[in-house]
């Protein structure tokens, strides 16, 4: 998957990629586009990201939009829905939504900046979500984002993560293919 970090300069201080860039990426590749919306009002942008070619849209449970309504809008657009939790948000926050979700993203750094180091105290959170999902939605994927290198990747997978997001480790490597293979 290609993970696209979308920042609005409001939910997080940085500004990054918006729908026109996603549209351009879509033209260039058939890869699964996983759009991580670090924005205050995801509900208002579901349509533009789905029309731009997103295959999955994840948004923060800490955002200002109504969570239920935003999930419905994503599902009705034919896009896979996912929820994201920041380091200070407990695992239980996503439990009411697990049956509807394709994926939960557990942030292992504070969202908004690349290159931060991994927060190991997020591992019990991954485990708690995995255990709950096994009861209500065994197909649910758990994704981790932030500080992923081979050592932390192993810890996340042991805790129950299925999808590892890596930016700095892969794109900062001399050989991207080797970096991806070492995570796998
Ligand atoms: Zn991300």
Image (cartoon, rainbow, N blue to C red):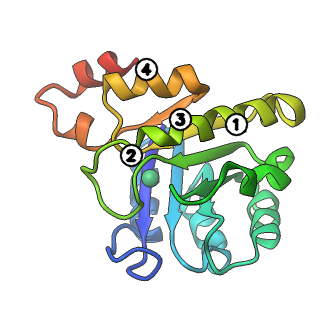
Upstream in sequence: badge 4 or badge 2: 2
Q: Which numbered disc covers residue 123?
A: 3
Residue shown at 40% from the left, 52% from the top: 109
Q: Are marks 1 and 4 in contact (CB under 8 Å)?
A: no
Upstream in sequence: badge 4 or badge 3: 3
User: Which quadrant is the C terminus positioned in?
Assistant: top left
Ligand 1 within 8 Å of disc 3? The answer is no
Q: Are marks 2 and 3 in contact (CB under 8 Å)?
A: no
Residue under circle 2?
A: 146
* Mark 4 and mark 2: Cα distance apart in space: 14 Å
Is label 1 in a helix, a strand or a loop? helix
Residue shown at 74% from the left, 35% from the top: 140
Q: Nearer the viewer, mark 4 or mark 3?
A: 3
Residue under circle 4?
A: 154
Graded by Cα atoms within 10 Å as few (under 14), some (14 to 19) or many (20 or more), the crowding at tag 4 reads some
Q: Is residue 92 above or below residue 157?
A: below
Q: Is residue 84 above or below residue 150?
A: below
Ligand 1 within 8 Å of disc 2? The answer is yes
Q: Are marks 4 and 3 in contact (CB under 8 Å)?
A: no
* Mark 1 and mark 4: Cα distance apart in space: 17 Å
Q: Nearer the viewer, mark 2 or mark 3?
A: 3
Is label 3 in a helix, a strand or a loop? helix
Residue shown at 33% from the left, 41% from the top: 147
Residue shown at 52% from the left, 55% from the top: 35
Graded by Cα atoms within 10 Å as few (under 14), some (14 to 19) or many (20 or more), the crowding at tag 1 reads some
Q: Position of residue 34 (x, y in %)?
A: 53, 48
116 vs 119, left or right, is: left
Residue under circle 1?
A: 128
Q: Nearer the viewer, residue 164 or 129?
A: 129
């Amino acid at each position: 998957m290609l993970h696209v970090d979308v920042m609005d300069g409001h939910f997080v201080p940085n500004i990054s990629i918006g729908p026109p860039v996603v549209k351009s990426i879509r033209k260039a590749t058939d890869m699964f586009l996983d759009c991580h919306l670090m924005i205050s009002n995801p509900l208002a942008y579901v349509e533009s990201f789905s029309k731009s070619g997103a295959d999955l849209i994840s948004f923060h449970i800490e955002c200002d939009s109504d969570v239920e309504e935003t999930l419905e809008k994503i599902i009705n657009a034919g896009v896979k829905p996912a929820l994201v939790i920041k380091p200070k948000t407990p695992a239980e926050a996503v439990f009411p939504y697990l049956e509807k979700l394709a994926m939960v993203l557990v942030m292992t750094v504070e969202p908004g900046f690349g290159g931060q180091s991994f927060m190991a105290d997020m591992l019990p959170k991954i485990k708690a979500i995995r255990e709950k999902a096994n009861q209500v939605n065994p197909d649910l994927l758990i994704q981790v984002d932030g500080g992923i290198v081979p050592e932390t990747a192993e810890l996340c997978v042991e805790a129950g993560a299925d999808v590892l997001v890596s930016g700095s480790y892969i794109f900062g490597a001399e050989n991207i293919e080797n970096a991806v293979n070492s995570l796998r």
